[in-house]
Image: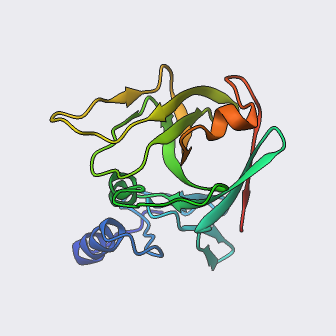
Amino acid sequence: MCVRTPLLIVVLCGIIAVSTLSGCVTMLPGTSTNTNSVTTAASGSAVKNGNSTTTAFKAPTTYRVTMRSTTVYAEAAYTPAEWEMGLMNRTYLNEDAGMLFIFPIQQQQSFWMKNMRIPLDIVFITADNHVLEIYASVPPCTSNPCTLYASSAPIKYALEVNSGFCARSGIASGDPVIIAAGS
């Protein structure tokens, strides 16, 4: 069975997803209505189709990220707009705070420090929840073009925390990472 989605619905969902308002998930034309399928939008919302009932849930806005015995309370960034904004223009970040960038697929990623006011540590995390690498004490960008900080391999997550946080906490490449929803 094929489900046809009117073009207007697809366009509206795209506009909503780009504006970072979660909650818009559609069946794309040609998508099967398998009773066990899960469709996820870039906005972090998903629906599970089963026996003609649809249950929608909204992805968490905060996560507890634990490395070694240290926990960071991180804001979530799911969409390209949220990734681009990041921690831009912030002048202060609590010692145990950060931002967790969640990517829909595991791939190499690059970060820059455009419009940043504070230096950060950038932790690249693999899909199997291990620290791939850490860019320590990355300074704000003061030149154009900004320096890019790229992962050496595909990642699923990136965590930005205060400069020096990883060194003070003894966090290193290869360490396991526990990511749990909620604050």
Residue 60, picture quadrant: bottom right
Q: Percent from the top left, x then y, of residue 82?
A: 39, 60
Q: How is the image coloured?
A: rainbow
Q: Is residue 19 shown above or below 109? A: below
The residue drawn where x is 41% and y is 60% is: 91
39 and 30: which is toward the camera? 39
For the C terminus, give its image quadrant: bottom right
Q: Percent from the top left, x then y, of residue 165?
A: 63, 41
Q: Percent from the top left, x then y, of residue 174?
A: 72, 23
Q: Is residue 25 shown above or below 147? A: below
- In this picture, residue 64 sits left or right of residue 164: right
The residue drawn where x is 48% and y is 19% is: 152
Asked if one can make out residue 129 in the rendered structure from this viewpoint, the answer is no
Residue sitting at the far left? 144
Residue sitting at the far top? 152
Q: Is residue 86 shown above or below 20? A: above
Number of numbered discs visible in the structure rendering: 0
- In this picture, residue 2 sits left or right of residue 53: left
Asked if one can make out residue 141 in the rendered structure from this viewpoint, the answer is yes
Residue sitting at the far bottom? 53
- In this picture, residue 119 sits left or right of residue 84: right
63 and 11: which is toward the camera? 63
Q: Percent from the top left, x then y, of residue 31?
A: 45, 57
The residue drawn where x is 50% and y is 21% is: 153
The residue drawn where x is 35% and y is 56% is: 88
Residue 143, picture quadrant: top left
Residue sitting at the far right? 69
